[in-house]
Image (cartoon, rainbow, N blue to C red):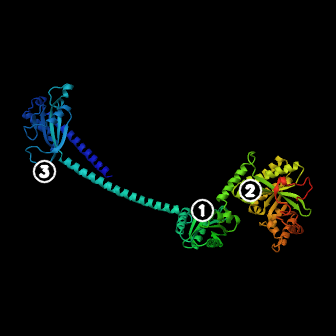
Amino acid sequence: MLLVGVALVVVTSSQMRGQAVRDGTAAAARTAMFAARAVPSTAFVTGLLSAAERDAVTDAIRGFGDELVELRLWSADGRLMYSSDGATTGLPRADRLTRVMRSGTPDAVVQPDVRAGVPAPDERTVLDVYVPVRLSDTATPEEPTDVAATARVGGAEVMLDHTVTQQTLQSTTRTVTLVVVGSLVVLWLLLFRIVHATSRRLRTTALDNARLALLDSLTGLPNRRLLADQMQRAIEKVADDDARVGLILLDIDRFKDINDTLGHDHGDELLQQVAERLRHALRDDDVVARLGGDEFAILLPDVRTVANAERLALRVRGLFARPFELSDIALHVETSIGVACLPDHAADASALMRTADIAMYAAKHHRTGVSVYSPASDDSSPARLVLLGELHRALESRGDPTEVPQLEMHYQPKIELASQRTVGLEALIRWRHPTRGLLPPGAFVPLAEQSGLIHRVTEFALEESVRQLARWHAQGQAVPVAVNLSAHDVASPAVVDMIELLLARHGVDASLLEVEVTETALVADRTRVVPVLERLSALGVCVAIDDFGTGTTSISQLRDLPVAELKIDRVFVADLGEGGRAGSEVVVQAMVDLAHSFGLRVVAEGVEDEPTARTLERLGVDRAQGFLWARPAPASAVHPPGGSSLHPIG
């Protein structure tokens, strides 16, 4: 800005001085022209003026006022012809006179008044201008030609008083300088204020952004980033102590339903109230954070035992016993809480977060409220991930003639207790693992359900069972085969389309295929499961409720379900043997009476001894299966009865 101001002052003053010189030069040229008109051209040749001619020049310039300091007329050869101050001798500035005579343009110079013999009590500045005198400017007696008129016959030196102009220029330059400096100062102050205010706003914004980067904008709690930092510090602090770092993850059950039903405003209000309760209910050193959505975390920087961490988690769950007041609504909220500790369940912060998350989802899946991490429920452990990859490859290799089939179906007979004859088979999948041997469904089916591979596993079980039914039918053997459907399968109408396609492709009657659905699957998503069961029943496929007694099916629900068979869970069957719980017969009898009242067939599974079989027959159970009669075996080792006759399988 300083350089701009200096440049502005210099340019402005230079322009004003130049304009003043140009104006003075024009005035001097006019003065010279008036003086030259009083002098004949011959006088410029001789270099002499008569007294009359001098008086004529004096009269010609008398009206130019006090600004004219002196007028001198010079001949072409540099002789002084006239001086308004009475001087009769003198020499011109030869260089300037020569330059003017050659160029034909005036030559002006601003200089101090230094004329000899002239007292100068006050310093004065003059504008000394040399002006060419042309033939046309003189008192020529005859009319000259155009060429002669432009001929230069002499020169006039006009000195004008430039003192006032110079003072005006200096005053104006000072004024411009003051204005420019003042403007620059004001501009600098204005810019300084703007920059200062902007800088302050930027600093404030940066601080707010830094705060928002570490805090949740809705609840004001630390976010995931700040929690990770605090967790790392806590781990480093207890590294040399006999202490633990605990982590509690909390998820609000069915929060999506709350948002969809009450609106997101009420959902946000609920999250704020949850954060407030958590913030004021824990220890001072504990860190409460919101990870996103409806998920919260509680860091326990110093917890002595895993049991203590679990007790704190139970205490946290107790905070939700009291309803939350949302406007005019009293809302009861349930939570699922997972607990993990370092070094018991993890070796670093990332692993601690992962194990706590696994524990939380285990609590949600099993509806236990609070769950401590267990390796058994860790479906993302390296060993289970390897097993999942191997299962994926086993499914991919189906139909490849160069690969040895790994998945196979085993069949266990269902026995009619009254006649001891085989009346059906249950198809049970097995995995003949290359290194682990024959694996039961419990070793890989849950993993398939959690990974999404269960649909392909079910497709294999149905296709293989229907294909085997077709083989037996071609051999003159016919017996119903039951296939288990997972909760994921039975909730999708696609399973009905697949069954219908398989039956048509292999020419198998629908009455020979049965499907078994667990009671918990019916309860979990009844609105989606029941339409699928109704389509299967209309197709002619028999539907059975498996593991009955472990769920919460009501009598009204059981009455309306399109099922034909009820299978009592093996837990109740085991209690009928020696050392079983008292009153088990009463429970089983109630199940049998309930099923028969609805026209359902009753099957007991897990029968391993003769006394239990006799007890079941006495209680009215229709059919049973278990190791008492046969273990599950490959199709080659099973001999179904031919036609409609039924024969026991030894």
Q: Residue at x 72, y 48 (%)?
A: 397
Q: Mark 3: give few (<14), some (14-19) or many (20+) Cα within 10 Å.
A: few
> What amino acid type is highlighted by mark number 3?
Asp
Q: Mark 1: give few (<14), some (14-19) or many (20+) Cα within 10 Å.
A: some
* Residue 606 visible in the shown view: yes
* Image position of 624 (left or right of 253): right
Q: Residue 632: x and y, percent?
A: 82, 58
How far is disc 1 from disc 3 in space, using C-alphas?
A: 98 Å
Q: Nearer the viewer, mark 1 or mark 2?
A: 2
Residue closer to the observer: 498 or 639: 639
Residue closer to the observer: 5 or 233: 233
Tag shown at residue 122: 3
> What amino acid type is highlighted by mark number 1?
Ala
> What amino acid type is highlighted by mark number 2?
Gly
Does residue 493 lie above or below 416 as drawn?
above
Q: Mark 2: give few (<14), some (14-19) or many (20+) Cα within 10 Å.
A: few
Q: Residue 562: x and y, percent?
A: 83, 59
SS of the residue at dot 3? loop
Q: Residue 344: x and y, percent?
A: 61, 67
Mark 3 or mark 2: whose residue is earlier in sequence:
3
Residue closer to the observer: 557 or 167: 557
SS of the residue at dot 2? strand
Residue closer to the observer: 629 or 267: 629
Q: Nearer the viewer, mark 3 or mark 2?
A: 2
* Image position of 359 (left or right of 284): right
Tag shown at residue 601: none
Quickly name the residue at label 1.
351
**Pointer 1 with pointer 3, Cβ within 8 A:** no
Quickly name the residue at label 2.
437
* Image position of 26 (left or right of 318): left
Q: Quadrant of residue 409?
A: bottom right
* Residue 258 visible in the shown view: no
